[in-house]
Amino acid sequence: MSDVKISAAEVNKLRKATGAGMMDCKKALVEAKGDFDAAIDVLRKKGQKVAEKRADRDSSEGAAAIKINDDNTVGVAIVLGCETDFVGKNENFLALANELADKAINFDNKEDFLASDFGGMTVSEKLVEQTGVIGEKLEINAFEKLEAPYVGSYVHINKIGALVGLSQENAEVAKDVAMQVASMGATTLSYKDFDPAYIASETEARIAVIEKDNIELGRLGKTLKNVPQYISMAQLTPEVMAQAEADAKEQLKAEGKPEQIWDKILPGKMDRFVSDNTTLDQEQCLLDQRFIKDEKQTVADYVASKNVEVTAFKRVSLG
């Protein structure tokens, strides 16, 4: 046993610098013969050993953290991953996630961020060090950055983070739309962003699923699901819409509805046609989704009513 005398003040200083436990700090200082920098290196090497042992572990728990600059024009969202929900809720872990987000906003990508300085070591090295301190694998599982004339955000119970860019300042709209992004999980801004090949393959796949379901529903004597011809507004060309209107008129005629009232009935039928044939947009396109605070309007309707535009969004989540 070493005769080196380690004071409580030295232990506390190392603990504040590394976040390690009191006993781990004392052992490191003893091993380093009281040399503070050498003790940090001892703890770092311990972290490396723990990290190597836990390299194949799943880090699907953790915390989402967001940082926006002072003038609300740049935002970053990260996920600091760990192995268990227990660690993910720990105050020190959450503080580390937020501290990392504060640094991440200065970088454009995850690689440069991980290689950047964090108190004399790189961010990657800090994660390894904290793996030794906490005893769980730590990773940056997500990194998203957004720039816009105005950036707002929303974090849902430290599990999901959303950034929203607007054409001009409006904190209320930014938060509302960020909540929409967090809640409904859109993957793109508009149906106009979809690749035609993706739409075609999704259409085929969705129709196949519904037709398969209808076989079972028919066997049980239940009402069959509607089989859509289309799934995105991108497919609803002027020709398609004209044919849909003609079909609706034929239906009204067959039902014996007086032609003079068709103008009152047709808009509702066309709205229903569009709704039934744009399910992909409603699920994945932010602007085409029903607004969670008022499902009578879309997100596009809501932001237009506030005289702003959504320019971009980013979403991060655990898992």
Image (cartoon, rainbow, N blue to C red):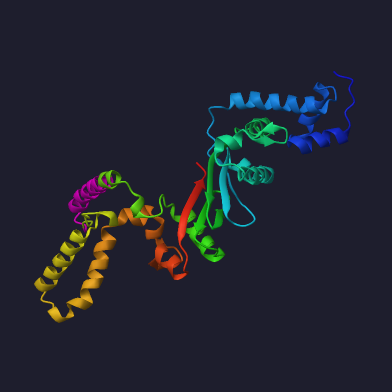
Which residue sits at x=62%, y=45%? Answer: 101
Answer yes or no: is residue 17 visible: yes
Q: Quadrant of residue 303?
A: bottom left
* Residue under the image location 44 percent in, 52 percent down: 185
Q: Mainly helix, strand or loop, the magenta region? A: helix
Relative height, residue 120 to residue 65 (above, below): above
Q: Is residue 157 visible?
A: no
- Front residue of 309/289: it is 309
Question: Is 15 above or below relative to 70?
Answer: above
Front in this rendered view, residue 273 or 24: 273
Q: Which residues are magenta?
A: 202-223
Q: Nearer the viewer, residue 233 or 79?
A: 233
Q: Give left or right: position of 302 versus 198.
A: right
Is 198 displayed left or right of 124 in the figure? left
Position of residue 48 in the picture relative to residue 261 (left or right):
right
Q: Residue 14: horizontal and vertical position, in percent?
A: 80, 34
Q: Number of marks in the image?
A: 0
Query: In the image, is 148 to the left or to the right of 218?
Result: right
Which residue is nearer to you in this view: 80 or 133?
80
Q: Position of residue 94 (x, y in %)?
A: 65, 45
User: Where's residue 1, x and y in %?
Assistant: 85, 18
State the image quarter where residue 35 is shown.
top right
**Looking at the picture, how far across and down is residue 238, in whole percent?**
21, 61
- Is 215 included in the stretch rendered in magenta? yes
Residue farthest along the top direction in this orientation: 1
Report the residue at 13% width, 69% height from top.
Answer: 251
